[in-house]
Each structure stands twice: as C-alpha cells, then as structure tokens.
Amino acid sequence: MHMPKIHTQIIISLILGAIFGAIFHVSQTKLVLTFGDEKGSQTIIIDDYERLELQIDDQNFSYAQKQNPLLLRKWQSLTTAEKKRAHLRIFHADSSSDQVYQNILEIRRENTIATAIKPIGTIFIRLLSLIAIPLVLGSLIVGAASLEDVKKVARVGLKTFVYYISTTVIAMSIGVAIANIIQPGTRINEESKQLLMAEYQPDIQKNIEETLSFDVVNMLVEMIPTNPFKAIASGEMLQIVFFAVLFGIMLTFIKPEKARPLIHFFDGLSETMIELVQKVMLIAPYAVFALIAATVAAFGFGILETLIWYFLCVIGAMLIHLLVIYPLFLKIFARTSIRDFFRGIRPAQLVAFSTSSSAATLPVNFECCEDNLKVPKRITSFVLPLGATINMDGTALYQGVAAIFIAQIYGFDLNLAQQLTVILTATLASIGTAPVPGVGIIMLIIVLKSIHVPGEGIALIMGVDRLLDMCRTVLNITGDAVGSVIVSATEVRRQAKGKKYTAEN
C-alpha cells in the first residue's frame, strides 16, 4: 500500500468531511419529539421556542435553546417509569401558544446525512482497537527476546535500555508539559465547548469519582496480572505490556531450540497484525470523512480551529527534544561534537522524513553511525535494531500531546494522577510500536483507553498525522543514533580505563 497516497487522501477527506458536515449540520435548536400511546404515536419537530421545561412529578428542569444537550442527557438518565410520568412544556415568546406534551416516547436531536454516516468511522475505530492487543503482545515479546543472550550483553543491554527509557520518559514529559502550557484543546469557542461538555458531562463526573481513590502504588501493583489471559480478554493494556516484556526476556534464558518456535510464532503474529493495519488504513479516508462530518455537523467548525495549535504543540515539543535534550545527552555522556553528529546523521534523517518508517531507515542509520560517526559494528548491530523496535521518542511525545489535546477537546480535566498514567502508558506502549507508518495511531488508542477518553477524537488529528509522522520518525531514528554513540563512547572509556589499570599493575 502506498502510504503517502493514503495520507493525502486522509487530508482531503478531512477537508471534504468538514465541508460536508457544515452543509448538513444538525440544528442546535431543533429537537425531534415522539409521543403517543398503544393506539399510535406521533413525531414532531420542536423549533422556535424560548425554553423547555421537563417535569417529572414535582420536579421541574428548565433548559434554554442552546442547552438542548443537557436536556437530552437528562432524558437519557431517566428510568422507564420516570419517562412515562414526564411532561414536556414548551415556552414560546407568545405565552398563549405554550404547549405541554405527555406520554413521551423519545426525545432526540434531528439527524442529518452527516450524522447518519458516523458508523463508518466507528467501525474504523473498532478495527484499530481489534488490532491493538495482538500487535502489542507480538511486538513486545519479539522486541524483548531480541536481546538474545542477556548474560553476554548485560552491560551494553542495561546501558541501552536505561537510555531508551529515560529519553522516552523525557520526551513524553515535554509533550505533556507543552500541551498543558498551551492547552490547544481549550482554544475553541465557548458554544462548541459547552456542547462538548454537555455531551460528556456524565463521563467527566464518573472519571472524577474513580480518581478519588487513585493510588500510585496500587496502580504499579495492578500492572502485574494474576492471569495474563484474563488481562488480554479484558484489554488491560498495562498488564499486557508487562507480561509481554517479561515473557520476551525469559525467552532469552531458555534453550534456543525451544525459544525459537515461540519467537517465530509471535513474530508471525506481529507481522500479521502489521499487515492488517495496512489493510485497515485503506478505509481511513472514508472513516475520517465520516467522523469529521458527524463531528462538524454536531458541533460546528469551532472544534477544528484548535488543529493549528495542536500541530504547533507537537512540532515545538519535538524541536525541544531534538535540539536540546539529545545534544545534552551527547555532551554529558559521549563528549562528542554536536555539529559532527548532526552532519553525520543527516542522510538517515532525510530518509526517515520521506519514508516515515524507522524500519526502512535502519540500513541507512547503520551506514551513518558506522561510517560517519565511527560507531563499531558490534555496538550498532545491537543498539540500532533494538532502538527501531523499542525506542520511539517521537511517537511517545506525539501520543502525550495528542492524548492531552483530545482530552481537552472533550472537556476532560485530567488531574496529576491521570497525566502520570498518560506518561506511563505512552512510554510502555511506545516500546511496542511497530516501526512502520500509521501504527502510532493504534498505540494512541491504548493511551486514550487508559484515561477513558473517547477514541473518536483521533479523527481530529489524522488530517495532519502524515506530516507529524514524518517528523516523529526523524526523532525516533535520531534517538537510536544518539544511543549508539553514547554506548560506544562509554564502552571505549571503560576499555581505556581497563587497559590503564592493567598497565599500572
């Protein structure tokens, strides 16, 4: 599949979907009311009124025109018995024309063709969710097992792993911090924001109630599954990640002839899921069109105005990580020239930018690190393939900004504990991100699930995902190269100290 063509289609679909949704928008003042009894029912359109009053027994709930979502939420929360006793009073400018309806069967928004096609996008989101668990399981087990003989490479492996985890956490933290400072998801007009808040207010309240008893230690304990199959069946992503990493590492301790079939099996599982991702992405343009059209039809263009701020947040955070964090690591741990490093790695960065694939860039990264940066092959052969599998600084950073952005769009006020959950989940999930274009979207679903944010919000960012994918792949492979230079430099210094010690004795 030609990914650039697909992503071009996605951008076009986002634009056309927004236009389509604007044309066939849902009226914010109209409601569809169905009422009647066993003899028959009648459906009417309620419009041109000042306010509505829902009466249940001796309780009255009053709503202005723009508060229709609140009325709908209230109606949906009622029991069947309460709905049967409910009355809807409609107040007009001319009080003589006020109306009262009883025996109400249904109150809903007016549907349009733009909202009717939303299930196409929902199917796409569900397909991505279907792929996520087996992809994480297969990729992480094979990635952890690629350490091979841990006893022989314990020292180099520990350095590599600590470096990768550290930079990933830093990248995630930068992304979350920038998103919190700029708050791209809050830069929408108040009307659209109120509609979103009304739509998801019960979910917000539920999250607040759940986080009252949040405990960091308990969260870490819960990461360890008592039954891995139950964790897989229930979609407990943190537990799946923990089990997969542990399983993969243990494969390096058993006899190769016994480990090899398992590694081949999970490698095949991972490859199958990656192939399925490629096929699912074929419907992405249609899904994005449907999701964006339904979103714009329901909430208007205001929800799309934040895309530029989201884009700038991701790019700004990436530049900080690329031009500040990596040079600091190189100076502190490798004591090498920053200019020479970026000059030497430039060809690999250009390939990464054009292909959006860490795997496709790996051969060029080998050449740049070995020929231009003078890193020994024994180091690159271990550090770079491992990095292409588990080191995804750009992906983790993007997931952090995207998760906060989507949460802000939907009005979720994430507390510190939830944001720490984003950092932890995205850090672990990025380890299992396959090095191919488009798979980062799968991992973003994992992050959103961890904080109970609607996955449909992903449609908002897919239009600019191609360009950001190109940029984050550059960050990913640059981080791999920095890791190989640091490990090589520390190994050289260690050998030099060893020789000096031997000579003195």
Image (cartoon, helix red, strand yellow):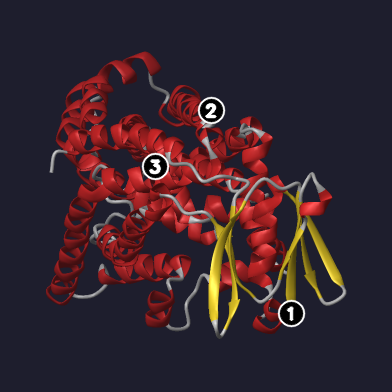
Q: Residue at x 39, y 18 (%)?
A: 338
Task: Give the residue type that dot 1 points to.
Answer: Arg
Residue 431, image x and y in percent? 37, 53
- Report the Cα–Cα distance between label 2 and label 1: 48 Å
Q: Quadrant of residue 353?
A: top left
- For marks 3 and 2, the one nearer the N-term is 2
Whether residue 484 appears in this view of the structure is no
Tell me: 143 left or right of 309.
left
Residue 170, image x and y in percent? 52, 40
Q: Secondary structure at mark 1?
A: helix
The quadrant of the picture occupied by the C terminus is top left
Label number found at residue 309: 2
Tell me: 410 left or right of 102.
left
Depth order, front residue of 478/409: 409
- For marks 1 and 3, the one nearer the N-term is 1
Q: Is residue 347 above or below residue 459?
A: above
Are there few (<14), some (14-19), or many (20+) residues within 10 Å of tag 1? few
- For marks 2 and 1, the one nearer the N-term is 1
Tell me: 479 left or right of 310.
left
Q: Which residue is mark 3?
A: 395
Residue 13, image x and y in percent? 31, 37
- Report the Cα–Cα distance between label 1 and label 3: 53 Å
Whether residue 79 appears in this view of the structure is yes
Task: Give the residue type that dot 3 points to.
Answer: Thr
Q: Which residue is mark 1?
A: 85
Q: Residue at x 29, y 15 (%)?
A: 343
